[in-house]
Image (tube, grey):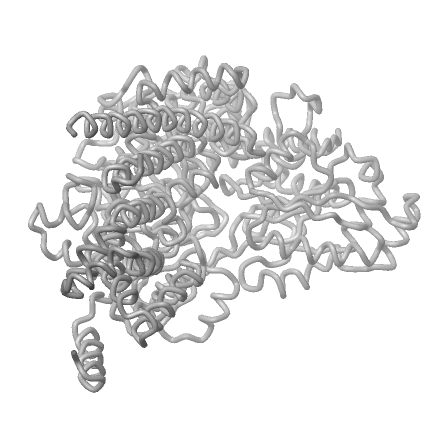
Amino acid sequence: MPTRREFLTSGAALAAASCLCPLSANATPRNIVVIGKAIDGIVNGFDPAEAYDASADVLPNLYRTLMIYDRSSPGQLTGDLAERVDVAPNGLSYRFTLRQGLKFGGGAPVTAQDVAFSLQRAVKMNKSPSFMLTQLGLNASNVQDAVRASQDNVVTLTLPEIRASGLVLATLSTTVTGVVEQKTVMAHDVNGDMGNLWLRKHSAGAGPYRLLDWQAADHIILGANAGASMQPSLPRLAIRHMGEPATELLQLRKSDLDIARTLGSDELHALAGDPAMNIIGTDALALIYVQMNKATPMFQKREVLQAIKWSIDYESIAAHVTPGLWNTWQSFLPKGTPGALTGKPYRKDVAKAKALLKAAGYPDGFTITFDHPNTWPYPDIAQAMQADLAQVGIRLQLLAGDYAQVLAKRRARQHQMQIGRFAADHIDSSSFASYFLPNTDDSDAAKVKNGAWNNHFVDAGLTAAALAANRELDTARRLAMYEQMQRDFWEAAPIAFLLQKRDVAVARQGVTGLAIGPIDAYTHYSGVRKS
Amino acid sequence: MSSLKARHWRSRVGASASGLTAMVATLFGLVLVTFVIGRAMPVDPVLAIVGDRATPDVVARVRLELGLDRPLLEQFWIYLHHIARGDFGTSVMTGQSVVADVLHFFPATMELATLAILVAVLVGVPLGVLAAARAGSRLDAAVRVISLTGQSTPVFVQALLCLLVFYVKLGIAPGLGQQDIAFDGLVPSVTGALVIDAALDRQWDVFRDALAHLAMPALTLAFVSMSMIVRMTRTFMLDALSGEFVVTAHAKGLSPLRIVWRHAFGNVAGRLTVVIVLAYAGLLEGAVLTETVFGWPGLGQYLTRSLLNADMNAVLGATVVIGTVYVVLNFGADVAYRLLDPRVK
């Protein structure tokens, strides 16, 4: 039987031994970039014709597109695969001349036929992101003729109807237009799926990386795309799922991550001034807004909509609920979009809001339900708004729900008031305007069910203006149209914009070269290096 | 005598057969309830797949593809047909068959649960026996305190404390996940249990890394199970040690070791087996929180994520697998109890 002294001695020895021989070997390997990010929203994998939303920052690293966001001139696009773009004066015809020496992984050349095939495939498959191409007037029956490889290195796009060149070129920078290698993809065709099943977990692009492994909501491993004309600085990149920002911060501090992409306000505050960390950020084209369904009698009155817009303490929400990550913004075009108005006409004015409510016939206010997703920052914003609106007599009944549940309610137009979030698909102003403004058919059988339709918002003037802007070929006139639309929208719309996202990443010291774009589809990891 | 024995065995086989029938009925009930709950959820699985911006025709097509346009009874009948063929459908989250997903994630859970139960039994049973044999001693009091701590502290609190102490403060344990990202993809999957696969492939660096990652979550789970096992062992043994047969054994002059381990422990072995098997089943189906805290890519995490993404095929498939494991182990425990304890008919 060991004595107490022996027991304590051996315990101390064991503890000392475990410190000398740690099980963990801190710090990530030098040839791998490890990024922490919430990736549990990725469904169905990485086929560019099908993937949408959460996979958007991986796809531009696997696939190249005709056009790309120009980092040297923010707000502009430049050619990626396309060396030269010729637009016909009538706005219907586009001619893309490909660069020389472009190669897919494995070394096969990128041809005009591959580009045409990729665009045709995305339209024919008709998956979630295909609306970006079909809004140009392309559909399964006309795309074969509309997109053609006229020469080995020339792709022509002939639109059935006029679209603004800004919209067309921006669409050709989106992930759904990522160019796949036709031969490889069709070799994996199963029952006419054009390689869809295979591409969910593999890649066949000309990007700097190829997809090595994806375990849903766990990790994504990318490796250098050997043979491709563009190569990454480091041969391997791993994205680890981070469900909790606090855990992400912990792993970053313990050197288990090189870059953290989904930290919250609290974590960023904790890192402020830490010399071992570099905080990188850019204004993202994503907005948080509050929408009022005009099927609710109160919201049919313009004064009520205005009263709500004058009741919210925008600055306080940004300063106390989402500091560093979401800044105040009131226009439907976010900063960084051509034609965005930077003015903020609304501020909290209780007297003015009360007067407006009285004029609308609600001197004592009213009670209304308010749906919001149950994840940060929505509950905190909802509570702040509840307090703000209570001061003018509007009583919000908060209904928290899963994001998909809240979304389903909005799509069914069963909400009264709801918080929402919208992120751009591309840099062009139409990405926002097409969602929030036009409503040509407010019936349940409408073919287009956008943000305006969700809220029974029908404004003939704004609808006509938004559709006209999509067809306007003169860039200056088009920008002027968007500026006017933003002013009119403030007056008429049952939607109040609150905040614009700031996309923030934190990299450990010595990790450089991360290129965050204003949208995920413009984010590139290939330049990341470690010193 | 042999006729008596045969009748005895026949009665046990009969009881086991009726248990088997109950097991099938339970599984059917499990499938039915899970299916109904899945369809009654207020989350639209179609929207979870297509997102906010999909056009109405895309939404309608996906709804059709998932068969959600059909009456509920018809959907259930089709689902039963499919699972009878071993087809649990395709997970919308991973894009591959649910069976393939389960085969991928379940071995990680088994690896964790098996190591945990082994540690729990090897430590818990002797401790429980010792505590009972020295009832009222300091050792007994210490064992009871440890057992109470393990049972009264939620497992996720223990897991977080372990992470805080061994990973954050002391830095002697690796972080989250099943292995370091640098080793990912180096070992071909044979059994699905990374530690075993690494050993089979003689990749000793990967083996050490995988074992280090496995240690903390497994020991956390083991502590919880051990607390229960040690308490049950002590209680059973106290009961057995106060039996007349033990007094008789003492009177016959048998050694204390023989009385405790051969006579008393032999008497409680049947009951203890049931406790251990049920604890193991609980670990297989209830390690969700531990898997979440440690980022362990097991079936519990898969199920949770699928639920949050309204991936109903995956939820149903994983629930049926977990339910089946539980029911089968329960049945096994029942049979073992009948075989080990001659007093049970």
Tally of numbered tags:
0
Residue A362 image point, x, y percent: 90, 46
Q: Nearer the viewer, residue B88 or A227?
A: B88
Of residues A178 and B225, the one nearer the viewer is B225
Figure quadrant of residue A27: bottom left
Q: Is residue A268 above or below residue A402?
A: below
Q: Residue at x 57, y 32 (%)?
A: A473
* Residue A219 visible in image: no
B144 horizontally vs B60: left or right: left
Which x, y percent locates residue B233? 30, 57
- From the top left corner, tell me how far across and down residue A295 is, in percent: 77, 32
Residue depicted at x 68% and y 28% = A439
Residue nearer the viewer, A345 or B159: B159
Q: Is residue A292 visible?
A: yes
| Corner quadrant of residue B10 | top left
Q: Which residue sits furthest bottom?
A: A5
Q: Which quadrant of the figure contains the N terminus of chain A?
A: bottom left
Question: Residue A24 location in percent, x, y?
Answer: 22, 65
Q: Is residue A74 left or right of residue B206?
A: right
- Quarter of the figure that contains the C terminus of chain A: bottom left
Give the image quarter of residue A249: bottom left
Q: Is residue B186 above or below residue B72?
A: below
Q: Residue at x 61, y 52 (%)?
A: A378
Q: Nearer the viewer, residue B333 or B218?
A: B333
